Image: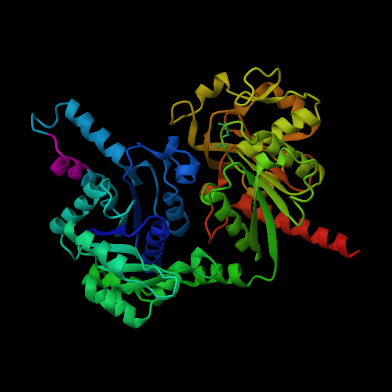
Amino acid sequence: MRKYIFVSGGVCSSLGKGIAAASLGSLMECRGLNVRMVKIDPYINVDAGTMSPYQHGEVYVTDDGAETDLDLGNYARYTQSPLSRANSITTGQIYQEVIQREREGRYLGRTVQVIPHITDRIKQRISMIGEQPDADVTIVEVGGTVGDIESVPFLEAGRQMVHELGHENVIFVHLTLVPETAGGELKTKPTQHSVKEMREIGVQPDVLLCRASVPLDEDLRRKIALFTNVEVDAVISASDVETTIYEIPLIFHRQKLDEIVLKKLHLEAGPVDLSEWEHVVRVMRDADRTITIAVVGKYIDLNDSYKSVDEALFHGGIANDVRVELRKVDSEKLEKLDSLDAVFAGVDAILVPGGFGSRGINGMVQVANYARTRRIPYLGICLGMQVMVIEYARSVLGLVDADSTEFAPETEHPVVSLLEDQVNVKMYGGTMRLGSNESKLLPGTTIREVYGAEMIEERHRHRYEFSNSYREQLNDAGLLITAVTADDSLVESVEWKGHPWGIGVQFHPEFKSKPFAAHPLFAGFVAAACAHGGSAEEADGS
Ligand code: GLN
């Protein structure tokens, strides 16, 4: 029998439900089970592709080109669950699928309703993942907060699954908040209310994960247990972490969450091995050296906009036994400055991530110029590579109006543009190049050395490309073309000739980095930052 764990949230949003679900998934894997992760987003958008990073944080891209919620990135970092379009469910998709069936006449004249038709479709979508042959446990995270109108059909589908498959096969883990008053007292009432709200829709949570600023003591846990009808051992204290979110699997394990869940699901599993998490936390907490990396973008006001990039940098740190500190820099603000020296003082490396639209572009071009001429390690991702191309064409080739047609459609020198032959490339989305593509790394290049391979597969999410008509001119001038698509039709990466470490990639390596296995580009980039920092220290000392 397949096992399902629903993870719901109460009281308010942004309590870290995705990380809690992912941590639980990781604990199940550390027990030797095969885990599948599913995210439900109750919004009407069909996917996250059109949503602003300001509203919803980063858009995470899967191999098959789905543009999904950033929680899939958390799942990818904490678990081995395969993730594709099928693992991300939205209200928009469910209604679209049901309406399409209705139009095809597949409901045989019946009135199509939320129950049973929408809930049936939700259950089918969940089962499509849960019944994959090697799936032992499927964790279904229901986005939003209990009490929202939007999430009701999904929780109802979960309730029906408990009823149909049995309580030993389907359980509910509910994440709530235990706030602290100004006087420092922890209050359980919001938790009581949110469990009451769950009960009203027919769901009794089996486990509570209680977010709080400090660990909950035994008395408080007993009180919560009494009022919510949850066993006291299953009232887990999810207090704020000290160093890193990668501590959470360890915090949960200390309170026996894995054991409790396995027991409730009548599952036998092996002993737990958490040594990899322990190692990650040890480096992030105790490393002797701290490296500062500037991330220069335009969505820096919201913490989650470059979530996977930030995490991949931390992974690069773990691989190099150093702590990585991020300095977020708003590219738009740089445009008014005469010198970037103060902004980048003490910075060991600079990363320019992806982005859309013209705002802040000139600031990024300035940064690429700064990193190149000051010989500071630089990693440009997608847009960050495109600004490298623009900068080089302007400064070195002297094409002062060189630009991307995204920002200057009429430019005389479109060094980045929409390409005619782009249509030949395997594309999943409309006009976007989305999902995984093969690239060939050219011999004798830094990127080839970094990957230690000739052929790689990385994910894309962009419209514009390095213009092929400028390949020769730029390459000859020292902006080396270092990777191309397997058919050589598109440029996939560039590097500055003679620079200690300046690489731009058209794809998004950050989506494939893991805490236990840093992506080679991020490991290499942080290593270069360490070397740069080292040489700066020596220079200072002499
Ligand atoms: N806006 C650029 C493009 O569409 C870069 C996209 C990105 O950085 N993801 O090509």
Q: Which image quadrant for residue 256? A: bottom left
Task: Tell me what residue is drawn at x 37 percent, y 80 percent.
Answer: 217
On the image, the x and y values in percent for residue 185 come to 40, 75
Judge left or right: residue 96 versus residue 340: left
Location of residue 192 by image quarter: bottom left
Q: Is residue 61 visible from the viewing direction of this image?
A: no
Relative vertical location of residue 31 with respect to residue 477 in this rendering, above or below: below
Q: Which residues are magenta?
A: 112-121
Q: In the orientation shown, which residue stands out farthest toward the front?
A: 183
Q: Position of residue 40 (x, y in %)?
A: 32, 48
Tell me what residue is drawn at x 68 percent, y 19 percent: 411
Furthest toward the left, the residue is: 109
- In the image, residue 518 lies at what x, y percent? 57, 56
Q: Per the image, is 242 magenta?
A: no
The residue at the point 76 percent across, 44 percent down is 371
Q: Is residue 370 left or right of residue 188?
A: right
Q: Quadrant of ligand 1?
A: top right
Q: Quadrant of residue 456?
A: top right
> Residue 118 magenta-drawn?
yes
Magenta highlight: main SS: helix
Q: Is residue 336 visible?
A: yes
Q: Is residue 186 left or right of residue 478?
A: left
Residue 386 placement (x, y as % from top left): 65, 33
Q: Can you say which quadrant of the picture contains the N terminus?
A: bottom left
Residue closer to the observer: 340 or 58 = 340
